[in-house]
Image (cartoon, grey):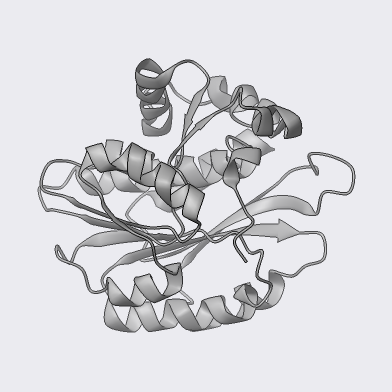
């Protein structure tokens, strides 16, 4: 299935959690004088405009980044990079994780992005080609295996599927275990929705059993509209950089 397009949800509360943690972790890793490989399995289009008809239709950004931006310290890497994107692309621009990652990385770091959806892949190529990204039109889970271990070996992988294929919940722990076997030093981060029907519970139980030392961070929020099934957002991080647990606690307070 290839129906999902993130423009309807860009800048929502789940994005705020995911992107704030992502920027913190990459910013910390980039402070060390060692190169980084960044790998993303389900990249989307990398740049969104919150005045687009699709975003306006759902109004999710109004309750997300528009409501919480001022709650962050001005020097937080997420807020700094959001400001940079808006200087480049206009005040309604919102960066997806590939663009945020590019802004966190340095010359000499490697950027590998996969996206299978034809329209999203075309938009991703248009935005991220100028950043020197290696862009692949490929199934994200297959790419995760093919791309690891990367060069440089030190690095970060974001797995952020749409979950429109319900079998993902059963398959993801096995995919991540396979990646971790090949790349035991990598930081591997999975974003997942918290759903009213508890579809995520089994997946998280298996992941926690396989990776007992991983960081699990979840925030909860009301459904954005009547009948909406997502009631929160989570990140499961294997080999989290130093300080990520404390940053997660600070972030939780913004959602309280």
- Closer to us: 185 or 131: 131
**Residue 201: quarter of image:** bottom right
Q: Quadrant of the N terminus?
A: bottom right
**Residue 202: quarter of image:** bottom right
Q: Is residue 115 above or below residue 139?
A: above
- Closer to us: 226 or 13: 226
Q: Residue furthest right?
A: 226
* Count of picture labels: 0
Q: Is residue 146 above or below residue 197?
A: below
Viewer can see residue 9? no
As drawn, is 49 to the left or to the right of 104? right
| Residue depicted at 12% across the width and 41% down the height | 107
Q: Is residue 99 above or below residue 210?
A: above
Q: Position of residue 85 (x, y in %)?
A: 38, 25
- Closer to us: 240 or 11: 11
| Residue depicted at 60% across the width and 56% down the height | 234
Viewer can see residue 53? yes
Q: Position of residue 62 (x, y in %)?
A: 68, 25
| Residue depicted at 31% across the width and 41% down the height | 128
| Residue depicted at 36% across the width and 78% down the height | 179
As drawn, is 194 to the left or to the right of 86? right
Q: Position of residue 248 (x, y in %)?
A: 50, 47
Q: Quadrant of the C terminus?
A: top right
């Amino acid at each position: 299935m290839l129906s999902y397009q993130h423009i309807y949800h860009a800048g929502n509360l789940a994005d705020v959690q995911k992107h704030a943690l992502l920027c913190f972790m990459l910013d910390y890793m980039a402070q060390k004088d060692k190169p980084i490989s960044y790998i993303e399995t389900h990249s989307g289009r990398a740049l969104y405009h919150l005045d687009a008809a699709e975003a306006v239709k759902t109004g999710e950004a109004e309750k997300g980044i528009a409501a919480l931006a001022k709650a962050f310290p001005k020097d937080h890497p997420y807020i700094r990079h959001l400001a940079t994107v808006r200087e480049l692309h206009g005040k309604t621009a919102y960066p997806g994780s590939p663009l945020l990652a590019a802004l966190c990385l340095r010359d000499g770091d490697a950027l590998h992005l996969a996206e299978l959806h034809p329209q999203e892949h075309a938009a991703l190529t248009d935005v991220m080609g100028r950043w020197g990204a290696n862009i692949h039109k490929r199934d994200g889970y297959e790419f995760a295996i093919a791309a690891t271990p990367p060069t440089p070996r030190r690095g970060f992988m974001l797995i952020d599927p749409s979950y429109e294929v319900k079998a993902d919940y059963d398959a993801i722990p096995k995919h991540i275990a396979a990646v971790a076997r090949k790349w035991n030093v990598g930081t591997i981060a999975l974003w997942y929705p918290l759903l009213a029907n508890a579809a995520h519970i089994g997946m998280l139980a298996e992941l926690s059993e396989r990776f007992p030392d991983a960081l699990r961070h979840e925030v909860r929020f009301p459904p954005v509209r009547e009948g909406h099934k997502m009631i929160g957002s989570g990140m499961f991080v294997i080999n989290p950089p130093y300080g990520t647990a404390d940053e997660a606690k600070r972030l939780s307070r913004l959602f309280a």
